[in-house]
Structure formats: structure tokens, C-alpha cells
Image (spheres, coloured by chain):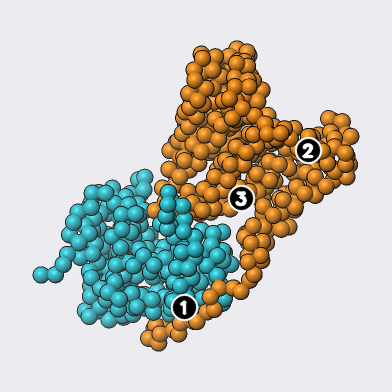
Chain colours: A orange, B cyan
Amino acid sequence: MSVSEKAPQPVVLPSGRSDSPLTKFIRGNRRPISALVFFIVLIACFTAANPRLFTNPLIYNAVFVSLPISIILVVPLVFIVTAGEIDLSFPSVVGICAWAFAAGTRANWNPFLCVVAALLVGVISGLVNGLLVTRVRLSSLVATLGMNFLLRGLIHIGNQGYGISVTQLRDTSFSNFFIGDINGFPVQMIWGILFAAIGWLLFSRHRFGAQIAVIGDNQDSAKEMGINVERVKTMAYVYMGIAAAVAGVLSTLINSTFYPTTGDGYLLAVLAAVFVGGTPTWGGVGTVVGGVIGAFIVGFIETGIIASGLTGYYTQFFYGLIIILSLISHRFNQGRYRY
Amino acid sequence: MNEPPIIELKNIAKSFGSVSAISNISMQVNDNEVLGLIGDNGAGKSTLIKIISGVHAPDSGEILVRGKNQMKWDVNIARAHGIETVYQDRALAEQQTITRNIFMGRERGGFLGFLDLKKENDEANNLMRSIGFTSRVFAPDSQVFTLSGGERQGVAIARALYFKAKMIILDEPTTALSLTESEKVFHFVRQAKEGGASAVFISHNIYHTYDISDRFVVLDRGRVVLETDKTKITANELVKSLQDIARSGHAA
């Protein structure tokens, strides 16, 4: 069985497929498009149930007051899930960053210095998470779950159940810059979208996002090709910590108060937004735009259910129903990702 | 006096826990030669090439590039010296595009690390077409899981080719490939040699290795047991001595 010396003929190929740009766009963005269609259908249903309310901009502006917090949190979580890991500690990181911001404000620090303090706490928390996962090699599911309890515990020990009021910031130029409104439209929504836009650039057009996807896809290959898996993953957790700090500051400003429970309510909503938005659970692929649309979907569910005339008892049922329906729609729209 | 060899290993040893994978290996790869690395399963071939390519750090021993001792050695340093590896598992990320796989770990970052996607795609397209490694119409944004085994190997080889390797390590490059696909791999190795590069060729198929190589290093249980030029041994003699080694642990 000897090897033939005959050289194989090179195959001359046309330069790529001749699909239209639109077909290419749809093929490359299946997941966020599917999430967007789901969101439009959802709003259409709510509008059909209560046309007067859902044609009024007031209802949207009401949701947009706190929606940016979910948007800011969902973006780095898409990175972490795409890298094949998870973070369950971000609600407490939001809380502990908010605490740092409020404590600084109470001590009459310059508000921008208080933001820096919150960011620093966020970066450190992210570093700890990242090192626990990559260096100590704990499962990210369990390690970040532990961190969530640990940090929330620290907040409770430090505050003994009391909140910190930051009403002195209300209507200051600082506060208006971050959470003011333009004809009723909350300014924080602009910050949220800007944060997401940067996130999209990092995810789709930057080395960081490319390496995140490769790591989540095949960690061994990434190592064989010289990618520093530990460092890139740790950077993703630090990114999450920065987002949690921004979210904590916004949340404190919106409520004019730091509550020891700040951030708690976002755990399931933000996790759901990642998956509702079309990022699968197994790593390697993800979508930032989809995650943001997922945050919109989850953000409108509760308002929509109440506005449709159902009582609060129905909320959780519909939450669950909508999450499962959206995952089913992704399942049937994803083409072939896996064998 | 010739230039010192592309790469030289001196007394390299590596253990995983209490299991010694390779012990005291010294070998070298010369300019413009194809070295056939031969050995049974568990002989230490994969560990050895992962040390050369920088994935594993050796426990002891020296790595010399062109006679210079390398104090630090990792994948990126090895690649910077023109040492490229086509791994047995092909080291691909299957849900990613061909382009992203080719530039994996060496993304073409421009301003602040942002990617020049158009340039990456164009270069990937040219590369894949120039090696003629696909049997159907494809695009650089095709995901790798849609490709056949031979096409995937093509992506892995294109990656080594793109970065103008001086030495290419091919670990079982023909496993699970059809005959024509395997021939393309051999053609590629010959082409690389004509272009002045060296190669380390690893295969279970001893006849494949014999045909393509200029020199052989035989490993057994983590040691070099035989090193010989092709001019000094016929294929049948090589097979015979491998059988002796398998029986007795050393060449006859």
C-alpha cells in the first residue's frame, strides 16, 4: 500500500456562495431575529388585550426606568455563558457595589469618586469569581452560587437590615446625567443601549469575543492554538463585575436608596433573558443583541400580564410559559448547530 | 559548518502525576527534512509533540531553537519561531466559521484589538481555494461542523500554511481520511518540503511514514530506541525492527 506520487489537481472554486446579502444576514442572525419576532408577537398580544394602554408611550417609559439594569447585566452574562461558564453571583455583586456607592455618598464623597469605588468593588468581585473558576478550578455553577450567598451575607452583616438613603443626590446634575429624563424618556435607557452596543462590538468584532466563543466551543483547541483560557475567562468575570457596579449605581440612584436586597430581583430575570434571547446553554455561540431583546421580553411580561387584566397570581405562570415557548421557538429555528 | 537545527531537544522528560510519559528524550529536526516519528500507542509521541508545540511544559530538559536555549516556551513562542502543529483532533472549534478557526489565537486585530473581518475572510477564502482542499462550494463563513473530515483537515492545514511555517508537525493527519484525501495531505507535505520547510510526520501507518519521511525516530515507552536515515533502511527492515522493539523493548 504505497502512496501515489501523482499530485492531486487543485479544485477551482467560485468565490463563495452567491446568496443575497439579506439571506446572509438572516442566516448569520437567526437567533436574535427569532427573539425579536417573539417580542413583537408578545407586544401584539398585550396590545390586543389592552389596546388603550399599549398604544400609550407612558407604559413603555415606565418599563424603561428599570429595564436598563437588566440590559446592562445580560450583556456580560452572554459572554460568560458563551464561554461555557455561568455566573449566579451577580445579584449580590450588584448589591455590594451599590453599598459601596451609597456608603461613599453618605460620607459626602464626590459622587464620581463613589462610582469609582463601586467599579473597584465590582472588578475585585469579578476577579475573585474568575480566579475561583480558572485557577482553583471550581465549577462556576457552584462557586458563583457560593459567592452570591457570601457577598449577600456580608451586606447583611454590614448593614444589619438597614438601607442607606441617597436622597441628597436627587435632582443633582450628577443624578440627572445618569437617570434624568428627556420628555419622560428615561436617560438610563440610553446608557443601557450604549453599554449593549459596546458589548456587541466586543462580542462580534473584537479579539475578546472571538476567543470567548472559541473557548466555549472547544477549550482544548483554544489552548492548543495558544489562547490563554484562564485569562480570557477571568476577563469575562471582571466584565460582569463592572456591569454589576454600573447596575448597582443606577439602581441606587433610581430608588434614591440602597436596600440590602439591591440586585436580588434580577437573578432569574437576567438569566432567563440570556436564554430567551437565543444564547444556547452549551457554549461556543451566543448573541448579545438577542440577550438585550430577551431583557425586553422578560421586562414586559409582568406589566403586560397585569395590563391584560389578569391578577398578580398569574404572573409566574406566564413567566414560565413565555420562557418555555421562546426556547421552543429557538429550538425549531436554529438550523443545525449540533449533531 | 551547517546552521544549527531548527529545533533540538536535550534530555526532555515529562510525567503526568506518577505516570512517566517520556523520559530523557534527545532528538532534533534538521532543515528541509521530513522526520517520521514512529511508536506504538502510549509510546509518548503525542506528549513529545505537545512539548515541541508548547502545549505542555517539560519537567526537565532543554529546548534549543537554532542552537539557542529557550528558557520560556509556550504555544505562542513556538509559533513565533515558525513551528506549526496540525493536531490529531485537528484543534478546531466546530461551531465557529472557517475564518475564525484559521485565525484562532492569532486574530487579525487592528485598532484596539478590533478585528479586520473583511481581511480575515478574504485571506481565508484565498487560502482555502489555493490548497484546493474542498470538494464543494463553501464560504469562509461556513461553520466547521458542516465540513467533511478531509475538509476539516484542510482547515487545520491551511492554518499552519497561512502563518508560513518553517516546521510543521502533523499528528496522525490521515486518520479517518479517504484515500484521495490522504493523498492531498502527502502532497501538502511534499509541497511544504519543496518550499524549504521541515516537517514531523506521525502516523500509525508505517508505510505512509516510510514513503514520506527522510529520517525516522522510533519511540518506545517514552524513550528513543531507534534513529536512522531512510537511505540506511528499507521499509521491510523498518517494520522488522519495530516488531523486535515491540517484543523486546529495544532494536535488534
- Can you tell which quarter of the image residue A166 is in? top right
Residue that mark 3 sits on = A287
Instruction: Check whether the beta carbons of the residues at disc 2 and disc 3 lie within 8 A of each other.
Output: no
Q: Amino acid at mark 3?
A: Thr
- Give the image location of residue A220, x and y in percent: 46, 53
Q: Secondary structure at mark 3?
A: loop
Q: Is residue A208 left or right of residue B9?
A: right
Q: Nearer the viewer, mark 2 or mark 3?
A: 2
Q: CA distance from mark 1 to mark 2?
A: 58 Å
Residue nearest the viewer, comparing B12 with A300: A300
Quadrant position of the N terminus of chain B in the picture: bottom left
Residue that mark 1 sits on = B132
Query: Upstream in the sequence, badge 2 or badge 3?
Result: 2
- The residue located at (47%, 75%) in the rendering is B129
Residue that mark 2 sits on = A57
Q: Is residue A263 visible?
A: no
Q: Secondary structure at mark 2?
A: helix
Q: Amino acid at mark 2?
A: Pro
- Give the image location of residue A42, x and y in percent: 80, 46
Instruction: Categorize mark 2 by other alpha carbons within 10 Å: few (<14), some (14-19), many (20+).
Output: few
The relative height of residue A249 versus residue A158 in the rendered view (above or below) is below
Q: Chain of mark 1?
A: B
Asked if labels 3 and 1 share a chain, the reply is no
